[in-house]
Amino acid sequence: MRGWKTILATIAVAILLSTSLGAAQHLGKLRAHSPRPVTQVQQQAEHGDSNRLALVIGNSSYPDADAPLAQIAGDSDTLASALRDDGFDVELVRNATRHDMTRAIARLQARLHPGSTVMIYFGGFGVQSRGDNYLIPVDAKIWTERDVRREGINLEDVLSELKDTGAKVRVAVVDASRRNPYERRFRSYSHGLAAIEADQNELILTSDTADHVVDETTGQHSVLMTTLVNEMKSARPIAQVFDSTRDAVAHITENRQVPAVSSALTGNVTLGPAAAGTRVSAREGLTDRPT
């Protein structure tokens, strides 16, 4: 009898193990075919217009500067809001380190496609070196001109990388034509930015002409941004908006500041209030260090 009981017990255990293994395999198949969870960035991206993307970087707090660039904070917030109203999916990054800037640019590139219109704005310090322009992160450690090329973000390289994505229209607004806090450390230096020539389907607005600097003014917003945002409300082609902005700023400042516009657009891109029902989103601040 004991022998039969042992045999029956063994068979029961085998059946139980077989049933458990089959259930585990079935559960594994269900998991394999179940949809993966969507990341936060993917969820946010779905709510914007994938054809109109913008990256707004406002660097106002530099440890090496005598004082914060107070207007940059207000300018970047205002432009981001205006672009959202115009149907752009905007990522706003404040006081970005080099790592922050490279990551934000990489995210932007990853979302672009041949039908995209893309705008990038940078407000902060810019330095020219060997004919190229470098956007300076807030954590840059610059003592020589060589440090500029190592620590800064090459603007011309960024524009070239955006072109490589096949984006239909590429627009850049660069408010970095100011006297930088590093120039006294160099043996020789150049004021302002070097001239930038737009490539095909590209439009570039800089805050002043090449080799000139803009004097800091009082007020929450710069003359450039106040004028640009007002001109954007006119629902005209963006090239006309930039030209009107240049002319208006020159008039207001009595030619002390004359923004530079370089255009190689082959089609029209209209700026103005977004159409009713347009869904937009804003992903704000990788960093937001107090000024």
Image: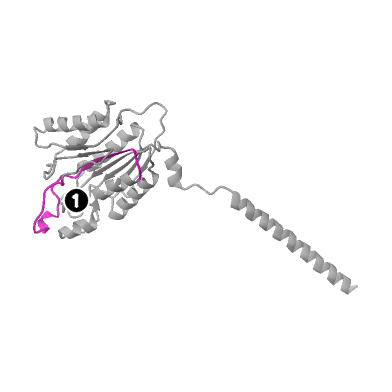
Residue 169 forms part of the magenta stretch: yes
Q: Is residue 157 above or below residue 80?
A: below
Residue 71, picture quadrant: top left
Q: Nearer the viewer, residue 19 or 155?
A: 155
Q: Label 1: how many residues lie within 10 Å, few (<14), some (14-19) or many (20+)?
A: some
Instruction: Report the span colored magenta.
Output: 165-194
Q: Nearer the viewer, residue 167 or 270?
A: 167
Look at 16% across and 44% down and name the residue there: 195
Q: Nearer the viewer, residue 34 or 113?
A: 113
Image position, residue 50 (x, y; %): 40, 38
User: In the picture provided, is 211 more to the left or to the right than 265?
Assistant: left
Report whether residue 43 is seen: yes
Report the number of discs: 1
Image position, residue 198 (x, y; %): 23, 41
Q: Residue furthest right?
A: 1
Residue 152, picture quadrant: bottom left
User: In the picture provided, is 200 more to the left or to the right than 10?
Assistant: left
Q: Is residue 285 above or below residue 85?
A: below
User: In the picture provided, is 43 more to the left or to the right than 217?
Assistant: right
Instruction: State which quarter of the image contains the N terminus.
Output: bottom right
Residue 183, picture quadrant: bottom left
Report whether residue 291 is seen: no
The residue under label 1 is 132
Look at 23% across and 57% down and name the residue there: 151
Residue 189 forms part of the magenta stretch: yes
User: In the picture provided, is 258 more to the left or to the right than 41?
Assistant: left
Q: Callout 1, which amino acid? A: Asp
Q: Main secondary structure of the magenta part?
A: loop
Image position, residue 7 (x, y; %): 84, 70
Is disc 1 placed on a helix, strand or loop?
strand
Image position, residue 236 (x, y; %): 27, 26
